[in-house]
Image (cartoon, coloured by chain):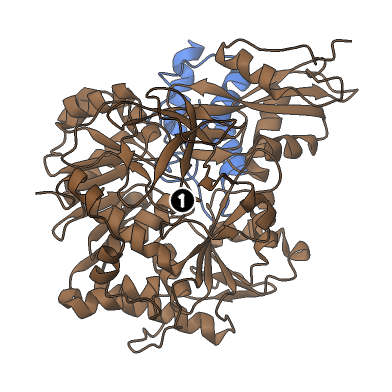
Chain colours: A blue, B brown
Amino acid sequence: MDEMKDVVLKYVINEYLEDEDEVLTYDTPLISGGIVDSFSMVSLKRFLENKYKISIPDDKATPEAFDSVTKIVKLVNEFLK
Amino acid sequence: MSNIGSYEERLNNFSWKTAEEELGYKEGEVINIGWHCTDRICKMGKAQKTALIWEGHGGEEKRYTFDDIRKATNTIGHYLRSIGIKNEDRVCLFMDKVPELYLGFLGVLKIGAIAQPLFSAFGDESLFVRLENAQTKAIITQRKHVGKVRKLLERTPFLEHIIIIDHDGLKPLKDREKAFDLEKAEWIDEFEIFPTKAESPSVLHYTSGTTGLPKGVKHVHYSMISQYLTAKWVLDLQDSDIYWCTADPGWVTGTSYGIIGAWSNGVTQCVLDAGFSAENWYKFIQKNKVTMWYSAPTAIRSLMKAGEELVKQYDLSSLRHLASVGEPLNAEAVIWSQRVFGKPFYDTYWQTETGSMMICNYPGMKVKPGSMGKVFPGVTGAVIDEKTFEPINEPNKPGLIGFKPGWPAMMRTYWNNEETYKKKFANGWYLPGDKSTVDADGYYWFVGRDDDVINTAGHLVSPFEVESALLEHPAVAESAVVSKPDEVNMEVVKAFVTLKPGFEPGEDLELEIMNFIRKKLSPLAMPQEIEYLEKLPKTRSGKIMRRMLRAQEWGQDIGDTSTLDDE
């Protein structure tokens, strides 16, 4: 779980964070915090699906479910089981 | 009673002089959007009225009275003058929806300079082509976005000033960078604005076409006449309203109605600078007791997806009037809104080039769900035959939407591109590039675009721009970009690519290419799907047949394939 959290956090920092001084934690709001917009969410979803060999249905890929690294990991784990 | 009263009566007795008189403007005199939206409102006795309620991420809130925004815009104008910005210099505003974006826009206009707002999610290449086209002299931005500007320094020698509004002093400023903190600056009470006239340039908004680079749509200070009146009559803005325009001022709705329309009417508006979430939006309406809400079909459809149970958890009874813009509002959304909010969203149709609303649904006029409404009084519109460019008088027959030039907010030209500007006209009609029908009652019904431009979530994306950027990826040999249908965004970008030798198609490469475009252009331009092909369909002369690919995505007949090179 913690390893997945770190992988997702690192990916978000590398791909979406524009301000290099901004500190991102597992619980930083990503969508409502304006770090990842709804269009970019598509590429984040694709990353998770490729990395963890899962398929996340569109109705589960909501802004709320993607709003932090912690929430994303919880969502991914639902489909890993 | 609505501001417009009877649409039919307004139609019969219309004159733009009504708005000129209400704004205290006489032909030949000074007219300045920055002054009219701030100083004039204060002179009307509303200095202490709230102009802006701003909420950022995490609930941070700031409030400004009209006197505050008068002084703040003076202060920004004064600062820009002090570093050598003169009238008609282009000043880019490249920020999230922070107060400085709204205040900076008017500060730029007060000194007669031209405001060039750009969507802060643009990647460095999208930013570059727009700065280069405008030969922008200064850019006002935030620390979080300055990295994209720094990448362009060698290619932008004309860009003399990079103004950072939130520099924290922890790292030194770099070449051409300056720190300007509005809150710490000494606010200027007395300020002499530049005496702009009706035809003085005010705003450069960039929009995408099928081919070529983005075009800078030039507007003038006189545009406020129609922005003021449409905000009053269509949005029905009234003195006691709390108005929320959800658009980003990086796009034309965010300036025409997110700044000028509201404040030239002296109305309190609120801004939420946070990513979309249905819950947060409802909370924001409840907390601020929003009365007039101007949003977009994509957002409305996202709210529909979030469900009706969520709506019931909030007190949204303050809502008095709702309107929508950006792409056609589907009938289901209008019906849903009537059921859930007790009132329909009133669709409005216009575009960057028209500067103000052109075809609208009006308070008091029957709404036909799915229709764009009727032409605004003072504007002559018609459905035009595609071959003869004459108006079609037969109801329900599709043709091109056309408007007779002459309304105040009509663009004056494309910046450094008069040739393309002239191509937008035929037989005396301005053609926005959309097709529609008009029914026997005069209601317009959207049919589709007349070109390959992709309208995704109300924003136009040029397939040419995405195709060109795709070719810069090391794996891509050829590319074709079209729209594909999307339940929420109406259309999204889809790319077809062929790969260079040595590259294999795969999911990881697809993601890599998607992210490449997202960072280079913008999240809107990022293909949501990439399909690998052995070869692209082309004519015998070598032109890619986008039409075929698009038809395939939309489940339409692929049409005439006689020119297809099928070797």
- Residue B388 appears in the rendering: yes
**Residue drawn at point x = 70 percent, y = 61 percent:** B132
State which quadrant residue B187 falls in. Answer: bottom left
Q: Chain of mark 1?
A: B
- Front residue (pair B242, B549): B549
- Residue B170 coordinates in the image, percent (x, y): 56, 70
Q: Which element type, helix, strand or loop, lies under badge 1? A: loop
Q: Is residue B509 placed above or below B548 in the rendered structure?
A: below
Q: Is residue B516 visible?
A: no
Q: Is residue B349 left or right of residue A40?
A: left
Location of residue B92 (image quadrant): bottom right
Residue at the far left: name it.
Answer: B1
Observer-nearest residue: B417 or B379?
A: B379
B415 left or right of B545 in image: left
Task: Tell me: A49 left or right of B391.
Answer: right
> Residue B367 location in percent, x, y?
23, 31
**Total marks placed:** 1
Please, what is the three-letter code of the amino acid marked with disc 1? Thr
Judge whether A13 appears above or below B340 on screen. below
- In the image, taking residue B250 as reference, residue B103 lies left or right, namely left
Say which quarter of the image contains residue B76: bottom left
- Residue B265, how many percent across, how many down? 25, 63
Residue at image position (68%, 17%) is B548
Location of mark 1 (residue): B354
Mark 1 Cα shell of 10 Å, populated few (<14), some (14-19), many (≥20) = many
Q: Is residue A56 or residue B176 the one in the foreground?
A: B176
